[in-house]
Image (spheres, rainbow, N blue to C red):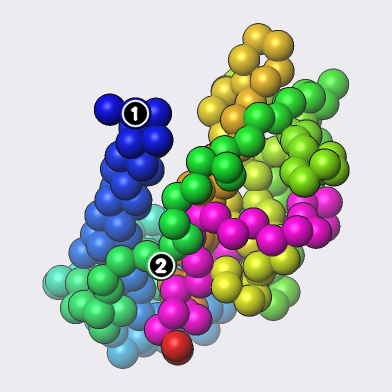
Amino acid sequence: MTATDTFQTEWQDWRTAREAALADPHGWLSLTALHWLDEQPIGLDEVPGLWHVDGDAVVHSGTHAARTLTPVEGAPGERIELADRIAEVIRRTGRFAVRIHDPKAPALAAFTGIPAYDADPAWVLAGRFDAFPDSRTVTTGAVVDGLEHHHNAVGTVTFEWDGSEHTLVAFGDGSGPTRVLFTDATSGVTTYPAARILHLAAPAADGTVVLDFTRAENLPCAFTDAATCPIAPADNRLPFAVEAGERNPRQEVTA
Protein backbone atom coordinates (compact mmCIF):
# COMPACT_ATOMS: atom_id res chain seq x y z
CA MET A 1 0.00 0.00 0.00
CA THR A 2 1.37 3.41 -0.98
CA ALA A 3 1.55 6.42 1.33
CA THR A 4 -1.34 7.97 -0.62
CA ASP A 5 -3.44 4.84 -0.18
CA THR A 6 -2.71 4.81 3.55
CA PHE A 7 -3.65 8.48 3.84
CA GLN A 8 -6.96 7.92 2.01
CA THR A 9 -7.79 4.81 4.07
CA GLU A 10 -7.09 6.55 7.38
CA TRP A 11 -9.09 9.59 6.31
CA GLN A 12 -12.03 7.42 5.31
CA ASP A 13 -11.87 5.62 8.66
CA TRP A 14 -11.98 9.00 10.42
CA ARG A 15 -14.92 10.08 8.28
CA THR A 16 -16.82 6.84 8.99
CA ALA A 17 -16.29 7.26 12.75
CA ARG A 18 -17.47 10.88 12.58
CA GLU A 19 -20.66 9.94 10.80
CA ALA A 20 -21.35 7.03 13.15
CA ALA A 21 -21.04 9.34 16.17
CA LEU A 22 -23.35 11.90 14.61
CA ALA A 23 -25.93 9.20 13.89
CA ASP A 24 -26.19 8.23 17.57
CA PRO A 25 -29.93 7.98 18.47
CA HIS A 26 -29.46 10.59 21.23
CA GLY A 27 -26.66 12.60 19.60
CA TRP A 28 -26.62 16.03 18.00
CA LEU A 29 -28.93 15.13 15.12
CA SER A 30 -31.57 13.99 17.60
CA LEU A 31 -32.02 17.51 18.98
CA THR A 32 -35.45 18.92 18.21
CA ALA A 33 -35.79 21.90 20.57
CA LEU A 34 -34.00 24.32 22.87
CA HIS A 35 -36.10 25.89 25.65
CA TRP A 36 -34.70 28.69 27.83
CA LEU A 37 -35.87 28.69 31.44
CA ASP A 38 -36.47 31.22 34.19
CA GLU A 39 -38.01 31.20 37.67
CA GLN A 40 -41.53 30.70 36.34
CA PRO A 41 -42.42 26.97 36.04
CA ILE A 42 -43.29 25.97 32.48
CA GLY A 43 -44.34 22.76 30.75
CA LEU A 44 -42.74 21.58 27.52
CA ASP A 45 -44.63 19.93 24.68
CA GLU A 46 -42.02 17.23 24.14
CA VAL A 47 -41.61 15.84 27.68
CA PRO A 48 -43.75 15.64 30.85
CA GLY A 49 -43.38 17.76 33.97
CA LEU A 50 -42.64 21.35 34.86
CA TRP A 51 -39.27 23.12 34.71
CA HIS A 52 -37.98 26.22 36.47
CA VAL A 53 -34.77 27.86 37.67
CA ASP A 54 -34.06 27.95 41.39
CA GLY A 55 -30.86 29.88 42.09
CA ASP A 56 -27.98 27.95 40.52
CA ALA A 57 -30.07 24.91 39.62
CA VAL A 58 -33.01 23.72 37.54
CA VAL A 59 -35.92 21.90 39.16
CA HIS A 60 -37.98 19.32 37.27
CA SER A 61 -41.28 18.47 38.97
CA GLY A 62 -44.86 17.45 38.40
CA THR A 63 -44.70 13.73 37.62
CA HIS A 64 -42.59 12.40 40.52
CA ALA A 65 -40.49 13.67 43.38
CA ALA A 66 -38.85 16.90 42.25
CA ARG A 67 -35.37 16.54 40.78
CA THR A 68 -32.72 19.24 41.04
CA LEU A 69 -30.10 19.52 38.31
CA THR A 70 -26.93 21.62 38.48
CA PRO A 71 -25.24 21.61 35.07
CA VAL A 72 -21.72 23.04 34.74
CA GLU A 73 -21.28 26.28 32.81
CA GLY A 74 -20.28 25.58 29.21
CA ALA A 75 -20.13 21.80 29.66
CA PRO A 76 -22.38 19.02 28.36
CA GLY A 77 -25.64 19.06 30.27
CA GLU A 78 -27.27 16.80 32.82
CA ARG A 79 -29.66 14.33 31.21
CA ILE A 80 -33.00 12.86 32.27
CA GLU A 81 -34.55 9.96 30.34
CA LEU A 82 -38.27 10.57 29.83
CA ALA A 83 -39.90 7.73 27.85
CA ASP A 84 -37.95 7.46 24.58
CA ARG A 85 -36.66 11.03 24.77
CA ILE A 86 -33.89 12.69 26.76
CA ALA A 87 -34.14 16.13 28.32
CA GLU A 88 -30.69 17.69 28.67
CA VAL A 89 -30.35 20.64 31.05
CA ILE A 90 -27.50 23.02 30.15
CA ARG A 91 -26.01 26.22 31.53
CA ARG A 92 -24.69 28.91 29.19
CA THR A 93 -23.47 32.36 30.28
CA GLY A 94 -25.36 31.94 33.54
CA ARG A 95 -28.61 31.03 31.79
CA PHE A 96 -30.31 27.63 31.88
CA ALA A 97 -32.06 25.73 29.11
CA VAL A 98 -33.51 22.32 28.33
CA ARG A 99 -32.82 20.75 24.99
CA ILE A 100 -34.71 17.70 23.75
CA HIS A 101 -33.13 14.60 22.21
CA ASP A 102 -35.61 12.54 20.19
CA PRO A 103 -34.42 9.36 18.42
CA LYS A 104 -37.25 9.91 15.91
CA ALA A 105 -35.99 13.41 14.99
CA PRO A 106 -36.45 14.22 11.28
CA ALA A 107 -32.82 15.33 10.92
CA LEU A 108 -31.62 11.99 12.25
CA ALA A 109 -33.94 10.02 9.99
CA ALA A 110 -32.79 12.00 6.94
CA PHE A 111 -29.06 11.80 7.71
CA THR A 112 -26.99 10.24 4.92
CA GLY A 113 -23.53 11.57 5.77
CA ILE A 114 -21.48 14.72 6.25
CA PRO A 115 -20.55 16.58 3.04
CA ALA A 116 -16.81 17.11 2.75
CA TYR A 117 -14.09 18.11 0.35
CA ASP A 118 -12.09 15.28 -1.20
CA ALA A 119 -9.12 14.37 0.98
CA ASP A 120 -6.01 16.02 -0.44
CA PRO A 121 -2.70 15.39 1.38
CA ALA A 122 -1.54 18.86 0.28
CA TRP A 123 -3.71 20.15 3.15
CA VAL A 124 -1.67 18.29 5.77
CA LEU A 125 0.71 21.01 6.94
CA ALA A 126 3.62 21.20 9.35
CA GLY A 127 3.40 23.85 12.03
CA ARG A 128 5.10 25.08 15.18
CA PHE A 129 3.46 25.29 18.59
CA ASP A 130 4.61 28.07 20.92
CA ALA A 131 3.21 27.83 24.43
CA PHE A 132 2.17 30.93 26.33
CA PRO A 133 4.12 31.46 29.58
CA ASP A 134 0.76 31.25 31.32
CA SER A 135 -2.55 30.13 29.87
CA ARG A 136 -5.05 32.89 29.27
CA THR A 137 -8.81 33.13 28.78
CA VAL A 138 -10.11 34.03 25.34
CA THR A 139 -13.78 35.05 25.18
CA THR A 140 -15.79 34.56 22.02
CA GLY A 141 -19.39 35.05 21.07
CA ALA A 142 -21.77 32.24 20.22
CA VAL A 143 -24.25 31.33 17.51
CA VAL A 144 -26.96 32.28 20.04
CA ASP A 145 -27.15 36.03 20.59
CA GLY A 146 -26.17 37.14 24.08
CA LEU A 147 -24.10 34.06 24.96
CA GLU A 148 -20.34 33.90 25.50
CA HIS A 149 -17.78 31.11 25.52
CA HIS A 150 -14.61 31.26 27.61
CA HIS A 151 -11.71 29.23 26.24
CA ASN A 152 -8.43 28.28 27.88
CA ALA A 153 -5.78 29.43 25.39
CA VAL A 154 -2.44 27.66 25.85
CA GLY A 155 -0.37 28.94 22.93
CA THR A 156 -0.20 29.60 19.21
CA VAL A 157 0.31 27.41 16.17
CA THR A 158 2.21 28.95 13.25
CA PHE A 159 2.31 27.47 9.75
CA GLU A 160 2.93 28.49 6.15
CA TRP A 161 0.51 28.45 3.26
CA ASP A 162 1.23 29.71 -0.25
CA GLY A 163 4.40 31.48 0.87
CA SER A 164 2.84 33.35 3.80
CA GLU A 165 2.97 32.65 7.53
CA HIS A 166 -0.22 32.35 9.53
CA THR A 167 -0.86 31.98 13.26
CA LEU A 168 -3.79 30.45 15.13
CA VAL A 169 -4.55 30.58 18.86
CA ALA A 170 -4.79 27.05 20.30
CA PHE A 171 -7.08 25.97 23.14
CA GLY A 172 -6.57 23.09 25.56
CA ASP A 173 -5.72 22.21 29.14
CA GLY A 174 -1.95 22.60 28.68
CA SER A 175 -1.17 18.91 29.08
CA GLY A 176 -1.34 17.48 25.56
CA PRO A 177 -3.57 17.77 22.48
CA THR A 178 -4.97 21.15 21.51
CA ARG A 179 -7.68 22.43 19.22
CA VAL A 180 -8.26 25.50 17.10
CA LEU A 181 -11.50 27.17 16.10
CA PHE A 182 -11.09 28.93 12.77
CA THR A 183 -12.81 30.49 9.80
CA ASP A 184 -11.40 31.05 6.32
CA ALA A 185 -12.44 32.31 2.90
CA THR A 186 -14.82 29.35 2.46
CA SER A 187 -16.77 30.22 5.62
CA GLY A 188 -20.30 31.16 4.69
CA VAL A 189 -19.65 30.05 1.11
CA THR A 190 -19.08 26.29 1.14
CA THR A 191 -18.42 25.76 4.86
CA TYR A 192 -20.39 26.70 7.96
CA PRO A 193 -19.89 30.43 8.72
CA ALA A 194 -19.40 30.47 12.51
CA ALA A 195 -16.33 28.22 12.77
CA ARG A 196 -14.85 24.82 12.13
CA ILE A 197 -12.71 22.96 14.64
CA LEU A 198 -9.35 21.27 14.05
CA HIS A 199 -8.00 18.87 16.67
CA LEU A 200 -4.21 18.73 16.96
CA ALA A 201 -2.08 16.02 18.50
CA ALA A 202 0.30 17.00 21.29
CA PRO A 203 3.33 18.79 19.82
CA ALA A 204 6.68 17.03 19.56
CA ALA A 205 9.51 17.94 21.93
CA ASP A 206 10.73 20.58 19.48
CA GLY A 207 7.27 22.14 19.15
CA THR A 208 6.48 20.61 15.76
CA VAL A 209 2.79 19.95 15.21
CA VAL A 210 0.71 18.69 12.28
CA LEU A 211 -2.35 20.55 10.99
CA ASP A 212 -4.45 18.11 8.98
CA PHE A 213 -7.10 20.39 7.51
CA THR A 214 -8.68 17.42 5.74
CA ARG A 215 -10.09 16.60 9.18
CA ALA A 216 -11.51 20.04 9.92
CA GLU A 217 -14.85 19.34 11.56
CA ASN A 218 -18.17 21.10 11.74
CA LEU A 219 -19.36 22.15 15.17
CA PRO A 220 -22.78 20.82 16.26
CA CYS A 221 -24.43 24.12 15.33
CA ALA A 222 -23.82 23.30 11.67
CA PHE A 223 -26.38 20.51 12.06
CA THR A 224 -28.93 21.85 14.56
CA ASP A 225 -30.36 25.13 15.84
CA ALA A 226 -30.50 23.62 19.35
CA ALA A 227 -26.72 23.94 19.80
CA THR A 228 -24.99 26.94 21.41
CA CYS A 229 -21.57 26.70 19.75
CA PRO A 230 -18.85 29.36 19.89
CA ILE A 231 -17.73 31.42 16.95
CA ALA A 232 -14.08 31.58 15.98
CA PRO A 233 -11.92 34.13 17.82
CA ALA A 234 -10.88 37.18 15.80
CA ASP A 235 -7.24 36.01 15.69
CA ASN A 236 -8.22 32.74 13.98
CA ARG A 237 -9.77 34.06 10.79
CA LEU A 238 -7.60 32.83 7.93
CA PRO A 239 -7.56 35.04 4.81
CA PHE A 240 -7.39 32.17 2.29
CA ALA A 241 -9.76 29.35 1.32
CA VAL A 242 -9.24 26.09 3.20
CA GLU A 243 -10.85 23.79 0.64
CA ALA A 244 -10.51 20.77 2.89
CA GLY A 245 -12.47 19.07 5.63
CA GLU A 246 -16.19 19.13 6.23
CA ARG A 247 -18.53 21.36 4.25
CA ASN A 248 -21.71 23.12 5.33
CA PRO A 249 -24.46 20.47 5.64
CA ARG A 250 -27.18 23.11 5.66
CA GLN A 251 -26.02 24.45 2.33
CA GLU A 252 -25.88 20.95 0.88
CA VAL A 253 -29.47 20.30 1.98
CA THR A 254 -30.59 23.61 0.45
CA ALA A 255 -28.78 22.86 -2.79
Q: Main secondary structure of the magenta part?
A: loop
Would you place residue 196 above or below residue 165 in this image? below
How far across and down, in percent of the image, does residue 165 sit?
A: 84, 40
Q: Residues within 10 Å of mark 2 (few under 14, many from 20)?
A: some
In-image side of 228 versus 237 (left or right): left
How far across and down, in percent of the image, does residue 236 sit?
A: 77, 52
- For image coordinates 69% across by 77% down, the residue present is 145
Mark drawn on residue 115: 2
Can the viewer see residue 34 in this picture? no
Query: Which residue carries the number 1 mark?
Result: 2
| Residue type of the residue flagged with mark 2 | Pro
Asked where in the image residue 92 lies, by quadrant, the reply is bottom right
- For image coordinates 14% across by 72% down, the residue present is 83
CA distance separating discs 1 and 2: 26 Å
- The answer to whether residue 247 is magenta is yes
| Residue type of the residue flagged with mark 1 | Thr
Can the viewer see residue 38 in this picture? yes
Q: Secondary structure at mark 1?
A: loop
Magenta range: 226-253
Question: Relative to the observer, which residue lies in front, 74 or 124?
Answer: 124
Would you place residue 157 above or below residue 83 in this image? above
How far across and down, in percent of the image, does residue 186 sit?
A: 65, 68
